[in-house]
Image (cartoon, rainbow, N blue to C red):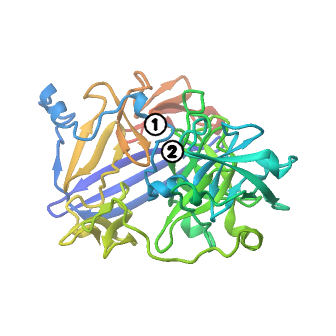
Amino acid sequence: MPDRIRQQAERDVDVVCYELLMRIPLRAFVVVIALAACVPAPVVEGQGAGAEGEGEGECSALSDKPSLGASAVYFGTRAPSHVILDAAQRLAVVGVGEGQPPGASCSGTLITDDVVLTATHCTQGEAATRFYVTFGADDFDPELVVDVVEKTEHPELDIAMLRLEFAPATRIDVRPIPAFGESLVEADEGEIFEQAGFGQTESGESNGLFFVAEPFDSFEEGGYLVVNGEGQHGVCFGDSGGPSLRQTVGGGARVMGALSYGDPECTGFDRYTRVDLARDWLEDFAGPIPGSGPVPCGAVTPSGRCTPDGRVAEFCDEGQLVRDPCTSGRICGDDDEGKRCIAVADNPCGDVTTFGSCDGDQLSWCDDGVVRERDCRACGGEACARVDNVVGFACVENACGSVTFQGECDGNVARWCEDNQVLTQNCADDGETCGFVDDDTGFFCQ
């Protein structure tokens, strides 16, 4: 569902009040939602990026956040970008093949020493001994191949487990990623999960193991959790059975589900069968799910880091990873110890994060305690858009041509550019006409 998002700023000596106006055009009506918040006025640099006196040097000085062409909008990465996995745990994301190796037709996860979690539709109708599991980033040149000797398929859900001929850790340095042992709830919606698999990439070919971070969007009937590729990235053919991973606070990386089916364009909403709905079945075959315990710090230092959206502070404390979600009114920023959750009022950038935001074609982001702004269209004819869950918002190659966020009327049809794509609304559907609304909204139905 398309959104038109505008921000209006009203400044006085001490505070800035940002109003976020979201217009959601539907076929039958228009919903307008207004949200308001006041924060201490942040230090802003680069407000001339579209103001009087702008020049090429000024645009160049405002390009601290990468100016990304279309080729930088990728489907996945070779290493996880959100969930912390060491080299041994990365090997736990496996390929599942049938017949003669090498190669994988599905994906899966080693969840115990000798049990792999995958999808029922990957194994149904064939004997367990027809399958094998590949370990390593390249399923056509794996570090190890292990035959399957036993399988079980859930009687109702699209989820299955495979027992291996031997524990792969006796041959290679691999460590299982356990299943999630608690309940997934609606309050978890919006959290970033990491998906992985050996499926098709944007090249149209399968090129080994890839990861992609996406937000957990919702629940769906049939025992699914849904993640949202936001039109930019996602899982694809061959990723079936692969994991959706969550970085838990006390238990490290956990498998939340196995991929059942996804968006045919490989960039939309994908459905994972939830493991928390099958815990008894899972433990009957694989044994007890391990409880929470210390999580290694990996590359995270004691000074820590913020997730790009500013919602979580991660830091190392006495050799253990601490992952601190920032509660309402707080944001990840700098204090005396490093990156920690602090009050928005104490953050030099206010509520602006490194993830950034777009106000039409105006990009704003926090860079080392300073709010920076860049007019993407004025500086190179680009557009402001969300790239992914790692980069956040950035200036990208303009796919809207001459159509701007303010838009235009094509007869009685409103046309505008949002998230670097041209969206339309036929005003006649609501008995309205297309026209200029105001400077902030632009052209729309009225």
**Up-down: is 232 above or below 380?**
below
Query: Disc 1 designates what residue?
Result: 418
Helix, strand or loop at label 1? It is: strand
Label 2: state its secondary structure.
Answer: loop
Could you say which quadrant of the image residue 429 lies in? Answer: top right
Q: With 398 as the anchor, is 104 left or right in this view?
A: right
* Rendering coords of residue 281 (x, y %): 77, 70
Q: Is 17 above or below relative to 373?
A: below
Residue 201: horizontal and vertical position, in percent? 56, 33
- Between the residue at mark 1 and the residue at mark 2, the CA separation in whole angstroms equals 8 Å
The residue carrying pointer 2 sits among few (fewer than 14), some (14 to 19) or many (20 or more) residues within 10 Å by Cα, namely some
Q: Is residue 440 above or below residue 206?
A: below
Mark toward the start of the polypeptide (1 vs 2): 2
Disc 2: which residue: 3
Amino acid on which the number 2 mark rests in the picture: Asp
Q: Are marks 1 and 2 in contact (CB under 8 Å)?
A: yes
